[in-house]
Image (tube, helix red, strand yellow):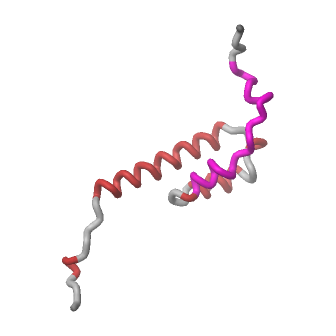
């Protein structure tokens, strides 16, 4: 039996909107981190990562997972107020 084009399931606009919002949020978080982080703390070129982040969900997740070097505790404390006991 042939299905008519009107019989196809239509995507749920609420779910699509939610997924688009998650994707945009991930990209904004990744681009902000990339912009604020010194080049020495990035694996590879900042320009390359900026382009990779634009790729759907995979780009921001890849940057946040593999693109950043681990923070050095000695440099992380620089610029923060010293806590006195």
Residue at x-position 75% and y-position 50%: 43
Residue 82 in the image: state x and y as whole percent. Answer: 72, 14
Q: Residue at x 22, y 80 (%)?
A: 5
- In the image, residue 75 sits, relative to residue 60, either above or below, namely above
Task: From the viewer's side, name the closer residue of 59 and 31.
Answer: 59
Query: Which quadrant would residue 51 be assigned to in this image?
Result: bottom right
Q: Does the magenta portion include 76?
A: yes
Q: Where is residue 39 in the image (x, y as percent from the top left)?
A: 74, 43
On the rendered image, what quadrant is the N terminus found in?
bottom left
User: Looking at the image, which is closer to me, 45 or 63?
Assistant: 63
Q: Is residue 81 above or below residue 17?
A: above
Place residue 69 in its image quadrant: top right
Query: What are the residue bounds of the magenta stretch?
Result: 59-80
User: Which residue is more in the foreground, 56 or 1?
Assistant: 1
Find residue 52 and report its horizontal and vertical position in percent: 61, 58
- Taking the spot 20% from the left edge, 83% from the top edge, the residue there is 4
Query: Which quarter of the figure has residue 83?
Result: top right
- Left or right: where 32 falls relative to 2: right
Verify whether residue 26 appears in magenta: no
State whether residue 47 is above or below residue 70. below
């Amino acid at each position: 039996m042939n299905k008519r084009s009107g019989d196809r399931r239509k995507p749920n606009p609420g779910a699509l909107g939610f997924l688009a919002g998650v994707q945009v949020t991930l990209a904004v978080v990744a681009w902000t981190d990339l912009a604020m982080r010194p080049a020495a703390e990035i694996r590879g070129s900042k320009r390359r990562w900026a382009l990779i982040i634009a790729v759907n969900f995979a780009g921001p997740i890849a940057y946040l997972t593999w693109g950043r070097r681990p923070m050095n505790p000695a440099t992380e404390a620089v610029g923060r107020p010293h806590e006195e006991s």
